[in-house]
Image (cartoon, helix red, strand yellow):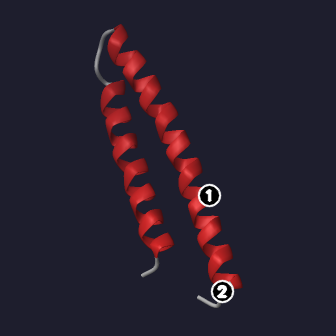
Amino acid sequence: MTVFDILVLIAIAAVAITLAFGIRSLYQTGPEARSRSNKLMRLRVALQALAVVLLVSGMWWKSTHGG
């Protein structure tokens, strides 16, 4: 396993955990729960973008360096 493989797995796990917390927060009541859910979903989108960048970078690295 390369560093990129480990980083991609960590990023995917972070996305899944953030998604779970965001969905859980959706079912709670109150204005602070709505705000928290919104922030968690924004964080999830940012983490997904990071995961995609890491995945593409890892594939590029393996294709150019014979990994």
- The local crowd at label 1, few if under 14, some if 14 to 19, many if 20 or more residues have their Cα within 10 Å, is few
Residue 65: image location, x then y, percent: 66, 86
Residue at 38%, 33% in the rendered image: 22
Instruction: For the residues labelled 2 and 1, say whether their Cβ atoms are less than 8 Å apart.
Output: no
Mark 2, Cα crowd under 10 Å, few <14 / some 14-19 / many 20+, is: few
Residue designated by label 1: 53
* Residue 65 placement, left or right of 27: right
Tell me how many marks there are: 2
Task: In the rendered view, tell whether residue 48 sits above or below residue 54.
Answer: above
Please identify the quadrant where the N terminus is shown: bottom left
**Would you name the residue on which mark 2 appears?**
65
Q: Residue furthest bottom?
A: 66
Where, by quadrant of the figure, is residue 59 drawn? bottom right
Q: Which amino acid is tagged 2? A: His
Q: Residue at x 54, y 41 (%)?
A: 46
Identity of the residue furthest to the right in this view: 64
Dot 2 or dot 1: first in sequence order is: 1
Gap between marks 2 and 1 measured at Cα: 18 Å
Nearer the observer, 44 or 4: 4
Q: Nearer the viewer, residue 37 or 9?
A: 9
18 sits to left or right of 47: left
Q: Position of residue 51 (x, y in %)?
A: 53, 56
Look at 57% across and 62% down and name the residue there: 54
Q: Which mark is residue 32?
A: none
Q: Name the secondary structure under disc 1.
A: helix
Task: Look at the picture and state if 39 lies above or below 11.
Answer: above
Amino acid carrying mark 1 in the image: Val
- The answer to whether residue 5 is above or below residue 51 is below
Examine the rendered structure and indicate whether residue 24 appears above or below residue 28: below
Image quadrant occupied by the C terminus: bottom right
SS type, badge 2: loop
Query: Can you give x and y, in whole percent of width and height, for residue 14 in the image?
Result: 39, 50
